[in-house]
Image (spheres, rainbow, N blue to C red):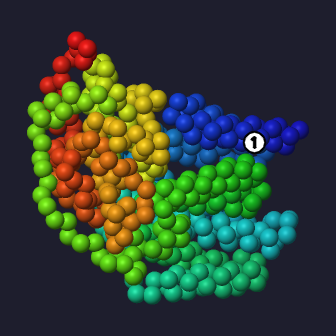
Amino acid sequence: MEQILLSVSYITASILFVLSLRGLSSQETAREGNFYGLSGMAIAVLSTMMSGTVTLYGPLVLVLVLGAAVGATMASRVEMTAMPELVALLHSFVGASAVLVGLSSYLGTDSHHGPRTILLIELFVDVLIGAITFTGSVIAFGKLRGAIGSKPLLLPGRHVINLGMVGSCVALGALFLMAPGVEGMQYLLIMACIAGLLGAHLVMAIGGADMPVVVSLLNSYSGWTAAAAGFMLSNDLLIITGALVGSSGAILSYIMCKAMNRSIWNVIFGGFGAEAPSGKSVTPVIAGDTREISVEQTTAQLMAARSVVIIPGYGMAVARAQHTVQQLTTLLRERGTKVRFAIHPVAGRLPGHMNVLLAEANIPYDIVEEMEDINPHLPETDLVLVVGANDIVNPSAERDTGSPIYGMPVLQAWKSKQVIIMKRSKGAGYAGVDNPLFYEPNAFMLLGDAKKTLEAVVARLPQGQSKAA
């Protein structure tokens, strides 16, 4: 009877996790998705605690309380600009726990009554993926935080090195399976170290511009790690949950790579940003001068425009300007201006980063549009306001075959009647690629901190007055 109740609880939790993923697919239902996920996890934890497999409640309750306190503190204090590195850090926890659970489970294999070889394979895969996830996530955390340079580290013969490490792990796996009792622990530990080096080397070779895809990939790895642990522990809930996370992360990575017109293998092994595409000329130095615009002129242009498209980027997150953008949007809409937001799939440092920022600022969902939907309407737009974005509005992606980002779909801001780019400086974006948009005849640059500049614009806009008035 107890096993039946546990199975029913796990099935209920699994259904809630599926509903959570479905809810998180849309801004309108994201809160419901979070609620379903929290409910499913609460049921899973409580039902596991009440099962007969748990005997030491004291240590379990202690670590649950400590973990909940640490998680709540981190979640309440983290800024939206630090959310990407927090997610990467959380992925590293999943990887580390998988390695520790795998090592401890191996010590108890003598008491296992099922087929030993199958158990050892599950255990080995769990530790392998967990170690790669752990070190890869730590490196991703360092890159996103700025502690590690964003440029890819391309060692000579790096692909041979990767293949050598993979081959070593396979060889150690064969020795591990043949070892009697728990004598294979040395092989398991050596493999974990090599897999850790492999994870670190893979992410070090990936440029900063690809970090959103890397975060999504690490999310997928953490899911497959959980699924492998589920097979190892004969836990159906872990298998289902891990498969959900792993497959959703893989699908999201594929969607993001497609949005950049690149394959997943190119992201993992390509060293993007370090060199021009093979066989193609290097991008020439951009000739011409940029034209700056003042706050007063920007305000006048916004008041004259009947249609405005705002393109947010990571610079908006850094300046914490999303709430000021919301105030600007409200004032413009009160005047009768048609305002829309254009979201690029890889804007920011995290999948959906811009959507989260806009939702936090209570931007109406119905005026937030994806790249493929908004691009056809940009030629008829009076004014495009680029807030802290760079690579996602770079014309080189369509014009310059020598550019590292050539072929990547971008928001075609230059096709609008006028473009105002808000940046701290005229420097290149995170990908390190110069942007010809700054030199377009219809483009102007409003330099400075985005929040302070927008606050100055909002202060000059007349309130409660429509164009008809």
Horizontal arrangement in the rendering, residue 388 relative to residue 122 (left or right): left
Examine the rendered structure and indicate whether residue 43 appears above or below residue 441.
Answer: above
In terms of secondary structure, where does tag 1 sit? Answer: helix
Residue shown at 16% from the left, 44% from the top = 446
Quadrant housing residue 466? top left
Horizontal arrangement in the rendering, residue 281 relative to residue 42 (left or right): left
Horizontal arrangement in the rendering, residue 269 relative to residue 250 (left or right): left
Place of residue 375 in the rendered image (x, y in percent of width and height, measured from the top left) = 41, 45
Identified by mark 1, the residue type is Tyr
Examine the rendered structure and indicate whether residue 387 appears above or below residue 296.
Answer: below
Given residues 307 and 365, the one toward you in this image is 307
Residue farthest to the top? 469
Quadrant housing residue 283? bottom left
Is residue 258 something one can see in this rendering? yes
Residue shown at 27% from the left, 19% from the top = 335
Horizontal arrangement in the rendering, residue 22 relative to residue 300 (left or right): right
Quarter holding the C terminus is top left
Is residue 370 something one can see in this rendering? no
Place of residue 112 in the rendered image (x, y in percent of width and height, measured from the top left) = 81, 65
Quadrant housing residue 307? top left
Q: Which residue is mark 1?
A: 10
Residue shown at 25% from the left, 30% from the top = 305
Given residues 140 and 323, the one toward you in this image is 323
Place of residue 134 in the rendered image (x, y in percent of width and height, measured from the top left) = 51, 64
Examine the rendered structure and indicate whether residue 456 appears above or below residue 14.
Answer: above
Quarter holding the N terminus is top right
Given residues 201 and 456, the one toward you in this image is 456
How dense is the environment of label 1, judged by Cα within 10 Å: few (below 14), some, or many (20 and up)?
many
Place of residue 294 in the rendered image (x, y in percent of width and height, measured from the top left) = 10, 39
Residue shown at 85% from the left, 69% from the top = 115
Numbered marks: total: 1
